[in-house]
Image: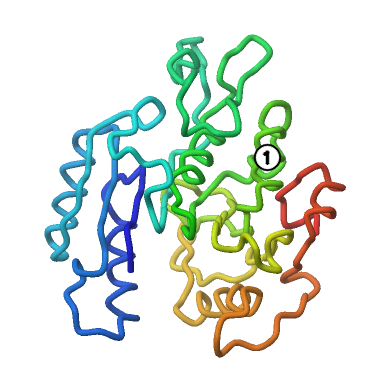
Amino acid sequence: SGSIYDPACGSGGMFVASANFVRAHSKANKGIMNQVSIFGQEKGEGNVRIAKMNLAIHGLSGKIEITNSFYEDPHKSIGKFDYVLANPPFNVKGKDKNGQIVIDGSKLKGDSRYIYGLPLTGQNQVINGNYLWIQMFASALSSKGRAGFVMANSASDASSSETEIRRKLIEGGVVDVIISVGSNMFLNATLPCTLWFFDKSKKGTDREKKILFINATDIYTEIDRAHNTWTDEQTQEIAEIVRSYRGEDGTQKYVDVKGRCKVATIDEVTASGYSLNPGRY
């Protein structure tokens, strides 16, 4: 339970999934909205309407704002949320193929959400929006907050100014788990991608200087030639690895499994050029 935030909420699917998760795991007989506060924002007015309708259909309510998340922060998100969940439109380049500005770097300067710097070229143009999204998610977390989001594989090893942002994230102790995912798992991402998880509550624990890497590219169930999914059992298989690494109650002691999972130290990640590509480990 707690506050849930998605700065790229689309049609609100993440919120519905979160509410269903809370319902399934709740030990109390309280209404779902006594346990969850929902906040989202989305650029497209049509998507905002669909998101609000989606919430209403499922008996939920939330504050969803129409805004360009790169430039505006209507929920004053910094340090505010217990959970951040997002499947953002990644790999949005600063300029399109016609040279038109898509993300205006001049509008980003001084925005305190981008705590680790801006992903700029040598000409002070935005490379792409990946490390803007990533910093939005990190900066929105409360002192015990957790984030989970989908990200392009390329962000794991991105170079230039993005390497420096990634270094600060890693050395800041917020990166907790990175999972490689196979193709066709998300409607807006047919290529293989990566799941990133942040956890501010790991600071001061034995996990603070460690990151768990999981290869889940071979875990999937085919729906059709263009769509794959995880069954409940497959989701639990991956979740149990994470729970054992975190030392949560009722789990077996974590062990590295060759080809499946590895806990790397920050020193190992540093030696690998601050790569967050699970294949490196």
The residue sitting at 55% across, 62% down in the picture is 201
- The foreground one among 200 and 33 is 200
Q: Is residue 226 above or below residue 7?
A: below
Residue at the front extreme?
Answer: 204
Quadrant of the image containing the N terminus: bottom left
Quadrant in the picture for residue 162: top right
Q: Which residue is drawn at 43% across and 49% down?
A: 87
Q: In this view, does 62 lie above or below 24?
A: above
Mark 1 residue crowding within 10 angstroms, few (<14) / some (14–19) / many (20+): some
Picture quarter with the C terminus: bottom right
| Viewer-closest of 184 and 235 | 235
Q: What element carries label 1?
A: helix
Label 1 sits on residue = 168
**Percent coordinates x, y for residue 13 in the rendering:** 30, 56
- The percent coordinates of residue 113 (x first, y second) are 47, 34
Q: Which colour scheme is used?
A: rainbow
At a point 37% along the width and 48% down the height, the residue shown is 80
Question: Residue 26's x, y, as percent?
Answer: 30, 81
- For image coordinates 29% across by 58% down, the residue present is 15
In the rendered image, residue 96, in percent from the top left (x then y), is placed at 49, 18
Front residue of 224/271: it is 271
Q: Count the marks.
A: 1
Give the side of residue 264 with respect to residue 52, left or right. Answer: right
Q: Is residue 198 left or right of residue 59?
A: right
Q: In this view, does 144 lie to the left or right of 1?
A: right
Location of residue 87 with respect to 15 vertically, above or below = above
Type of the residue with mark 1: Lys
